[in-house]
Image (tube, helix red, strand yellow):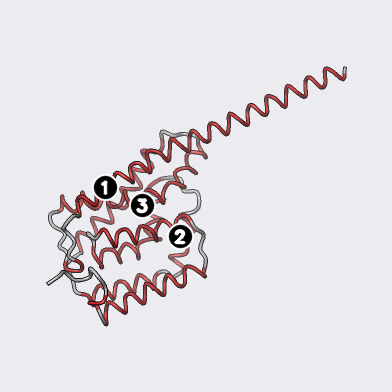
Amino acid sequence: MADHRFTSAFTVDRHSAQGAVSSIRGSTAATATVLTPTLGLAAASWAVTVWQMNGMDMGVATALGSFGFFAAVWVSMMAAMMLPGAAPALLRRVHADGRVRAVPVFVGSYLAVWTLVGLAVYAVYRPHGSAAAGAVVIAAGAYEFTPLKQHFRRRCREDVRSGFGFGLCCVGSSIGLMLMLVALGVISVTWMSIIAVVVLAQKLLPPRAAIDVPLALAIVGLGVLIVIAPSSVPGLTPPM
């Protein structure tokens, strides 16, 4: 009788262990299935964006060109900058419902939100001066302190049901930084890289006053420097 109980318990434990192993393998496979194409698309978008922007940056005097050209640059730029930070949300979505097929829809709707932002940028953007750029940068730094920014930043780290909803949260969180990019050099690989690093860090790391407050103050300080001494900021104005 004891042997039978021991055998039954062993069988249950073995099945449980096999189930756990299968679950881990399934989770690992799903993670690889999500991360590989997402980060691969981001890397490819970086290469395309750098190629598109070559020789186009004129600092605050940059003209956007035709709508078709700008749209192509903007979409590839958003894919390059935003997809790495969206990867955790994608993983949460896939692990929650187990449907890897939802990834293309999530990514497509997420990028669609940023494409709409690009349409708004194209509609209102004009080449401008350093004073206007500095004012936008100061406003972007001030936005980092607001409860609205903190709300949307927290939402970016929570479960979101759709790529469209996640995109709206990310726009709310990163809009100040993106306007800063537009003001300083909308077709600048240098500023794009800097802003992309900040956006990614804010997506992956929880809010911490010891980091966030100095960053916001640094952005405000950069804006003030641009207003009072624009020539001290490299790449802000086109070479004479």
Q: Give the structural element (helix, strand or loop) at label 2.
A: helix
Which residue type does callout 1 highlight?
A: Ala
CA gap between label 1 and label 3 equals 15 Å
- Tell me if residue 45 comes above or below residue 215 in the rendering: above
Q: Which callout, 2 or 3, points to the residue nearer the camera?
A: 3
Residue identified by numbered label 2 = 153
Q: Give the structural element (helix, strand or loop) at label 1.
A: helix
Which tag, 2 or 3, sits closer to the chain's start? Answer: 3
Nearest to the observer: residue 58 or residue 125: 58
| Residue displayed at 15% across by 70% down | 239
Residue identified by numbered label 3 = 82
Residue 113 in the figure: left or right of residue 18: left
- Tell me if residue 2 comes above or below residue 102 in the rendering: above
| Residue displayed at 41% across by 37% down | 102
Nearest to the observer: residue 172 or residue 221: 221
| Quadrant in the rendering for residue 178 | bottom left
State which quarter of the image contains the N terminus.
top right
Residue identified by numbered label 1 = 47
Which residue type does callout 3 highlight?
A: Met
